Amino acid sequence: MKFSSLILANLLRKKLRTALTIGSFAVALFLFGLLIVFQGAFSANADIAGTDRLVIQNKTSLIQPLPLSYRDRLLRIPGITQVTHDNWFGGVYQDKKNFFAQFAVDVDNQRQMYPEFVISDDQWKAFAGDREGAIAGAGLAKRFGWKIGDRIPIQGTIVPGAWEFNIHGIYTGKRPEDDTSQFWFHWDMFEERVPAEVKGLVGWYVVRIDNPDHGAEVARAIDQEFSNSPYETKTETEKAFATGFAKQMGNIEFLIMAIGSIVFFTLLLVTGNTMAIAVRERVGELAVLKALGYSDRFVLLMVLEESLVVALIGGGLGILLAKLFTMGGDPTHGFLPRFYLPLTGITAGIAAAIAVGIIAGLLPAISAMRLRVVDALRRV
């Protein structure tokens, strides 16, 4: 900006007003950043779901089990290349507030089914060789200070009793948004300790298909295979399965859009009013500039640039604070395992700040541009 010193002088004329306006932008963009984070947290599993994976659950409810014998029948269905199964454990570590996802997994197939979770061969081999072995996500291990070799006591709830596990590995994600808050242990150990009436049952199945384009056809074939049986199934893509969980929390996207719209409309009014007052206070100065030969276009751009400077400083500060806040980890203690402000969110925040800055400054800038020298000097 060629006349940056003039713009800076205008902004510093009323330091408190400028500071409050910048603060309004900062608060709004901080809130905007958090809304992006929460939206991503609720839709994380759906966004990163495998396109070639289907989830099979009991048609009645996810909490109802399925027979282990379905595994071999699933492998005989055309299009399915791999099958694994999981059980929700729901234990308590030290305190009921220490919530995190715990799964009894099929050790033979879990790692191959989820290649986005990275763990070394040595760690997986040690885990597979110990019936009391366990794998923890990097985020979970960091949260509780766990390390390889630790023995972790967990109090069972669905399957009561004291359970102890040996940490043999810590997995990471290939992407920042991958969930590293899970805890895996042997399904065989789980099977040994459950009551006799629920032995031979699993929580749900996950299958890999050879062609994602045929997902709907394979899902129908699976459900037809087990129709009219005591354990009918409901099969859907992993994305649809994860979206179902997100919808249980309500229409998050609508909530975010509604709150965001209110925030930015309020911000627009505050900033527009501030810039309008600033222009009215400088009517005489603007008239002098025009009398000296500065064009209407120059006056228009000068007022717009003032509004943009305020927007960029305040918006940048707000987004920075939001990013720093999310770098501290998940404040919900496991409820939102993905708590991350992506680059797209940062870019959207800066773009929103620029847009609000332009819109808020546009009317005062046009008013200043149309100002007639004679009329302006008459007011002084």
Image: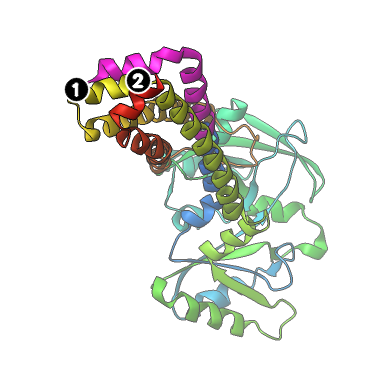
Residue 37 locus on image (x, y percent): 52, 41
Residue 18 belongs to magenta span: yes
Residue pictured at 72% horizontal, 76% vertical: 231
Magenta segment, prevailing SS (helix, strand or loop)? helix
**Closer to the camera, 218 or 169?**
218
Residue in the foreground of this view, choosing between 285 and 257: 285
Task: Tell me the CA gap for discs 1 and 2.
Answer: 22 Å
Lateral position of residue 295 relative to residue 342, left or right: left
Instruction: Tell whether 247 sits left or right of 342.
Output: right
Residue 263 percent across, percent down from the top left: 56, 40
Instruction: State the residue lying farthest toward the left.
Output: 293
As for residue 267 lying within the magenta part, the answer is no
Q: Which is nearer the eye, 192 or 106?
A: 106
Instruction: Examine the rendered structure and indicate whether residue 19 appears above or below residue 39.
Output: above
Amino acid at the residue labelled 1: Lys
CB within 8 Å, label 1 to label 2: no
- Magenta range is 1-29
Can the viewer see residue 169?
no
Quarter that holds the C terminus: top left
Residue at horizontal 65 percent and vertical 35 percent from the top: 332
Quarter of the image for residue 337 reads top right
Q: Which residue is mark 2?
A: 284
Compared to residue 289, the image places residue 357 above or below, namely: below
Read off the residue under disc 1.
Answer: 2
Where residue 132 sits in the image (x, y, percent)?
Answer: 64, 42
At x 47%, y 34%, the residue is 272
Mark earlier in primary sequence (1, 2) = 1
* Mark 2 crowd level (few <14, some 14–19, many ≥20, 10 Å Cα): some
Helix, strand or loop for disc 1: loop
Amino acid type of the residue that numbered disc 2 sits on in the rendered structure? Gly
> Viewer-proximal residue, 199 or 25?
25
Q: Is residue 92 visible?
A: yes
